[in-house]
Amino acid sequence: MNSQLPPLVNVLLLSLVASLGTGIGGLIAVIRRPGRRSFGFLMGITAGVMICLAFLELVNEAWNLGGPITATLGFGFGACFMFLLDYLAPHMRFGEVEFHGAHSAEGEAEECVDLRPRRMWRFSKALRRSPQRSLDHKLISSGILLAIGITLHNLPEGIAVGAGYMHNPQFGLFVALAIMLHNIPEGLATALPLCKGGIRRRDALRVAFLSGFAEPVGALLASLFLVNFSRLIPAALAFAGGVMVFITLDELIPSAREYGHVHWTSLGIILGSLFVFVLSALLGV
């Protein structure tokens, strides 16, 4: 981050850093498929990061800057926004395909992946099959649905980066680094079903990487808006906090505990929280 660059350029750079997390997660997935403990631990880390970032930083800053009413309304609106987004644009939950069949009834697992695979297959024609592997259209469709869902999530998360930078550049850097860590398990969850479905590893990595590019879009939109309406920065911070808490409680923690390992998920949540504490102290925010 360079103070001599225009603010919008710095916001773009920070949001790109945050978006790299999905690419890192995709790289982990194509190198080695994680087991239940590793999956639960990684998802726990991202849940700990999200919940601490939301309450300790975003909502707290909104409360200090705009008062309790602004923080409360912004937080509630952000949570309701994500609820409506999930309701109107449903998508696969994290780990649903990869880890469902290991401990659930076969009929229930089949129901989870039966999400119009023929329709979703039209979007996967650009992906090439891995040599000497048959294609599983349902797994590939599930991976694409996951990528769509993560892209939708990354858009409001980018708002947190933009609003954080417009409030304080150092705070924006802190938010971007925390979200980058959060994005790693999301990229992992995207690439896993694609690899298992027979798609080439490089193409699965490409999908995971590209799913993070909604982050800069959300960050730039928030920055462009807040440049002219700086009084709404506290509300934008609280909104981002509400978004993150909803994602954490609705998807991350339930998926981590169901498809991962309970104790390792708890350890991951603690480690993710410690990461936010240490990063906040180091950056002085």
Image: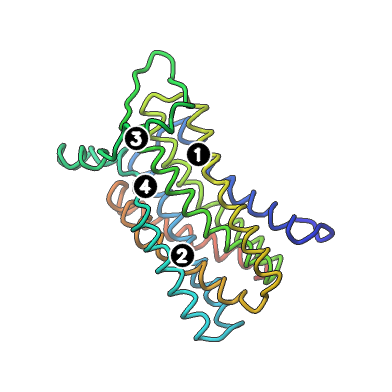
Residue on which the image places disc 1: 208
- Give the residue type at disc 3: Arg
The answer to the question of whether label 2 and label 4 lie on touching residues, with beta carbons closer than 8 A, is no
Q: Residue at x 27, y 50 (%)?
A: 258
Q: SS of the residue at dot 1?
A: helix
The three-letter code of the residue at mark 4 reads Phe
In 3D space, how far apart are the residues under numbered discs 3 and 4 (Cα atoms)? 21 Å
How crowded is the residue under tag 2: few (<14 C-alpha within 10 Å), some, or many (20+)?
many
Residue at point 34%, 51% (across, down): 90
In this figure, which residue is indicated by the disc labeled 2?
Answer: 243
Disc 3 crowd rating (10 Å Cα; few below 14, some 14-19, many 20+) is few
Q: In the image, residue 78 lies at what x, y percent?
A: 46, 69
Horizontal side of residue 257 vs 130, given as left or right: left
Q: Say what amino acid the circle numbered 2 marks.
A: Val
| Real-space CA distance between mark 1 and mark 3, rounded to the nearest whole angstrom | 20 Å
Q: CA distance from mark 2 to mark 1?
A: 21 Å
Residue at 50% in and 41% down: 25
Tell which tag, 3 or 4, sits nearer the viewer: 3
